[in-house]
Amino acid sequence: MNLDRARAEKLAAFLFLLPILLTLVVFLLGPMLYAFYISFHEFSFMVPKNSKFIFLDNYINLFSDDTFLTALKNTAFYSLGVVPVQMAIAFLLAVCVNSDIKGKTFFRVAFFLPTVTSSVAVSLMFMWMYSKTGIVNYLFSFFGIPAVDWLNNIHFALPALMALAVWTTVGNFMIIYLAGLQEIPKSVYEAADLDGLNAWQRLRFITWPLLKNTTYFVLIMSTIGTFQVFDTFYIITKGDGGPLDSTMTVVLYIFKAAFKHFDMGYASAMAFMLFLVIFGLSIAQRLFFGREEEA
Amino acid sequence: MAAVQFKAVTKTFDTTVVDKMDLQAREGEFVVLVGPSGCGKSTSLRMLAGLETVTDGSIHIGDRDVTALHPKDRGVAMVFQDYALYPHLTVEENISLGLKVRKLDPAEITERVASAAKVLELEKFLSKKPGQLSGGQRQRVAMGRAIVKRPEVYLFDEPLSNLDAKLRAQLRIEITRLHRRMKKTVFYVTHDQVEAMTLADTIAVMNEGKIQQVGPPMELYRHPKNRFVASFIGTPQMNFLDAELDGLTLKTKIFSLRIPDGLATEFTDFPKHFTLGCRPHDISRAAAGAGTAAMSADMVEQRGAESFLHCVQDGVSIVARCEPEDAPSPGENIHLRFNLARFHYFDSETNERLVAR
Ligand SMILES: Nc1ncnc2c1ncn2[C@@H]1O[C@H](COP(=O)(O)OP(=O)(O)OP(=O)(O)O)[C@@H](O)[C@H]1O
Ligand SMILES: [Mg+2]
């Protein structure tokens, strides 16, 4: 009787989980394994049966593919630029909107809004702002800086997109930092007041160390996010990473290889390289934060 | 130098929570602010610490008006109810952070931390983090953090309320001992009147934002100025009865007593009806006779060394003290004798004390 009930409960639990399990297997795990499989093939879209097993050739070819190396370099540059700036701004904004300023709810909403705005809309807005006659050039003209066609200049296109990325995602990380800040009891700050810590010392000795776990989380999420960037680049460069591959990112190149050159095997190999890079970075960051924990 | 003075201090949030509070502490005095939850004790203490602004009035420490000073410039140290330790710092860092930011000489810091750790028996825990300590140990760390600052005034906000009864009793003694050593002014907030009685040189009873009475513990116990203080100080609570004077006979619903001639003058200005207060310790079991109250025992509260009888009669409830071996069984009919010499009298309307003794 009891045994039957335990079994019935297990079955019920399994049935409740089934829909999500199925979705995960069909749309996530399955494609991943399949992609892994075809990354060792010269894949044929038309007749998948005719795919040729070429073992590591796709992976080896990656290292002599200038476009891939450029994409990797651009992505790394993008990530290195965006992550620290984004984290610093998110942290400072969170500290600001967590303090007792007037209209903090308004600011919280205002800073968060870009995150929930469609990336297409954001991209179009920035294209307009960055255009030769756009508001960015207009503002710079006050300082006597000549107009630049930001998005069509090989030196400025990537930094321009980095600024866009910071603007759109900073609100998201601000919210995460804000949640972390609100975990810190008020009385700890009162004790700090009595201990004579000034605003800077409070930030340095209390807020920042207590937000270490939050910072780690934000760092990981931000790094992964920047390495996977696609939508804004796709829209703004019309899918080709121009000018002259200066805004070619890894995911954009994967997309191009898969759906423009129809080279599925090669694209899958790239996807796995990207996976390894992100995985490695996450491990490295964990080790770094873990070591600090000991100290 | 470090006497403390509240001068007509008022604090208003949405409503007034501290109302024209006047209170002073001599240098080295141990003042306990006591009162029911929400009466404004913490708010008063936080105004003294500088964590809360003062709506009206002024606060003085020594000969300085500190009303507008930053907390760190007031020469006070505070121990919080939830300890408020820095969770990411070790015990040693917790204690020394305040000194470090004041740029004290490192040798001096080490020495102060070591001596505080010794006094509070924290030496073994110096490299631990607060999360690894028990409640009592954390409380000691919080005290250590206050002591090393060598403040003029110590502030405690219900520092023992998160601890179990045994630890509380132990720390109460330690706090008394510390106070005797340091000879500094202490403001101590609690809602526990036992804590107040055992620790205080002076107790200030608060209710609804107003100071009710200030004085040494025994004075408050013996001569409560009004019914609120009478009921708040002393445990179990004082019994209150409606009473009236009929010539020289004091009449209540459950007993009548003749007032001895020697005491008669005290009652000359009494209103006809008033409230009589009598502590459980001033009521005892007796044989039936004139002046006793016939009551029915309802429940016996055993405290070990003594027992408290909860009795009822004609809708009147009385708590009386008795020896454990004298305790009746529930439902038994008994007689109680009230000690007239220890009665307190209050005006039924204003609740103020009637005889100023
Ligand atoms: N920041 C605040 N804003 C609005 N009202 C407050 C604030 N702080 C305290 N109060 C109110 O002031 C009153 C007194 O609060 P206080 O904390 O001083 O009470 P207390 O005597 O310390 O009570 P307890 O024994 O429960 O700690 C309460 O009614 C409380 O709701
Ligand atoms: Mg309180």
Image (spheres, rainbow, N blue to C red):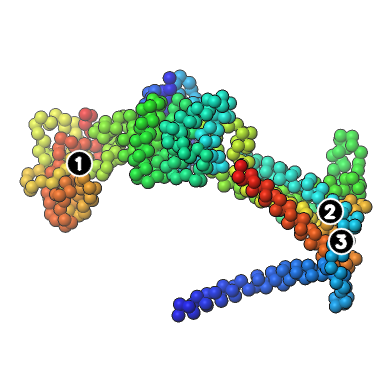
Q: Which residue is mark 1?
A: B281
Q: Which residue is mark 2?
A: A72
* Residue at figure coordinates x 85%, y 72% from the top left: A53
Query: In x, y percent, where is residue B86?
Result: 54, 40
> Badge 2 sits on which subunit?
A
Q: Is residue B183 above or below residue A139?
A: above
Are the residues tagged 2 and 3 within 8 Å (C-beta)?
Answer: no
Under mark 3, the amino acid is: Ile
Front residue of A129/B73: it is B73
Q: Which residue is mark 3?
A: A60
Under mark 1, the amino acid is: His
Query: In x, y percent, where is residue A207?
Result: 61, 40
What separation in Å lies between label 1 and label 3 (alpha carbons)?
95 Å
Quadrant where the C terminus of chain B is found in the figure: top left
* Residue at figure coordinates x 82%, y 59% from the top left: A251
Q: Earlier in the sequence, mark 2 or mark 3?
A: 3
Give a yes or no on whether discs 2 and 3 share a subunit: yes
Q: Is residue B229 visible?
A: yes
Q: Tell me the element at label 1.
A: helix
For the residue carrying disc 3, how many other residues have a C-alpha within 10 Å: few (<14), some (14-19), or many (20+)? few
What separation in Å lies between label 2 and label 3 (alpha carbons)?
15 Å
**A250 sits left or right of A84 in the view:** right
**B150 sits left or right of A49 in the view:** left
Under mark 2, the amino acid is: Leu
Front residue of B159/A112: it is B159
Viewer-nearest of discs 2 and 1: 2
